[in-house]
Image (cartoon, helix red, strand yellow):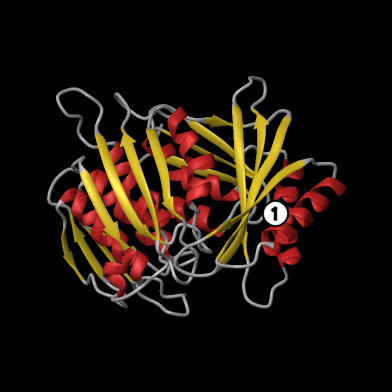
Amino acid sequence: MVTIDGSYGEGGGQVLRTSLALAAITGQALRIEYIRAQRKKPGLRPQHLTAVRAAAAVCAARLEGDELGSQTLTFAPGGPARPGQYTFDVTDAARGGSAGSVGLVLQTVLLPLALAQPDHGRAAESHLTLRGGTHVPWAPSASYLAHVFLPVLARMGVRIQVELVHWGFYPAGGGEIRVRIVGPEGSLRPIQLIRRGELKKVWGTAAVMNLPAHIPQRMANRARNVLGEAGLRAQVEPRRLRGAGPGAGIFLFAEHTLAPGEEIAIAGFTAYGRKGLPAERVAEAVCQELLAYDRSGAPADPYLADQLVLPMVLAEAESQVSTSQISPHLLTNVWVVRQFLTREIHVVGQLGAPGTITAKERA
């Protein structure tokens, strides 16, 4: 049994999700202690409990401690992950409405399902319906997954289609995505994201739900102006939605060629509105993140680098990724991987600065 200190590093839900994914992939039993101990509300919250039960469902795992608020969990896989059709609703774990992130639930089960045993020699295929928050703070949005993370996984051999059925903002939730996962034919291919070339375009969406139309227009206008002053032309579409509850956010994407080829690397940045925060300030926040990335010269944004750690160590041969910023999430993810796998993974660079992640077979 692998024992993990859930308070290590940034001490949040990333320790739990990466540990669950690796336990499901490797078949190793897992015990996590001090889950989210550094958070204001420690222990399992609805989205974490949903991720636990989702991981258990795909590999028939035995669970102990799977309840809201629990800071200790035992997870013992009953066998290899099984491709199939699954539905996971964060509301089921919340005892009422919840905007817990569906993206974080997907992050937990995606690779176990993609790497599941093929059916009669064909690539494994799974279909997921996930309900909860699709666009919430501190989690990859459905838009980010679709435009940034999943295209990179496709280059590594995993084909994933995401349909955004309903948007769901914090705190009401009510969102839904449908996901089709087709695993690689063989091993994951390595990835090389080292340098980027020409900036092709900057684009995005300023979206609100159940709020006046002038708010997304103000976010879009301010984003175009801030980026324009920095010499970047951006196409930002204002969008008004109807759904379970009010919400606002702006989602920007930057597309570059990958030097020396012509493949595209996409980086994504998000900022959410809240009561009392002017729409213009929301737009300025996301623009500052994008501009910092643009100055770095690296192809991977901090969130992509974090999410690529697991596929990199599971791929054959050597993978290398340069990121615009080394984050606590990234370093925590690397530590968790080392508790399960013998492959070498190194991060070169300082926290908060650009750096490079390398994963390869141990010499």
Q: Is residue 322 left or right of residue 160?
A: right
Is residue 74 visible in the rendered structure shown here?
Answer: yes
What's the residue at 47%, 50% (across, down)? 142
What's the residue at 41%, 31% (across, down)? 363
* Quarter holding residue 321: top right
Q: Which residue is mark 1?
A: 289
Q: Residues within 10 Å of mark 1 (few under 14, many from 20)?
A: some
In the rendered image, the vertical position of residue 264 relative to residue 271, given as above or below: above
What's the residue at 52%, 52% (across, down)? 330
| Residue 260 % position (x, y) | 67, 20
Is residue 10 or residue 206 the one in the foreground? Answer: 206
Q: Is residue 25 left or right of residue 64?
A: right
Q: Is residue 1 left or right of residue 202?
A: left
Is residue 339 visible in the rendered structure shown here?
Answer: no
Amino acid found under the numbered disc labelled 1: Glu
Q: Secondary structure at mark 1?
A: helix
| Residue 311 % position (x, y) | 41, 39
- In the rendered image, the quadrant that contains the N terminus is bottom left
* Quarter holding residue 13: bottom left
Is residue 328 or residue 80 the one in the foreground? Answer: 80
| Residue 18 % position (x, y) | 37, 53
What's the residue at 78%, 57% (across, down)? 222
Is residue 230 or residue 91 the one in the foreground? Answer: 91
| Residue 22 % position (x, y) | 30, 49
Most extreme residue toward the top, as rendered? 261
In the rendered image, the vertical position of residue 265 relative to residue 330, given as above or below: above
Q: How many marks?
A: 1
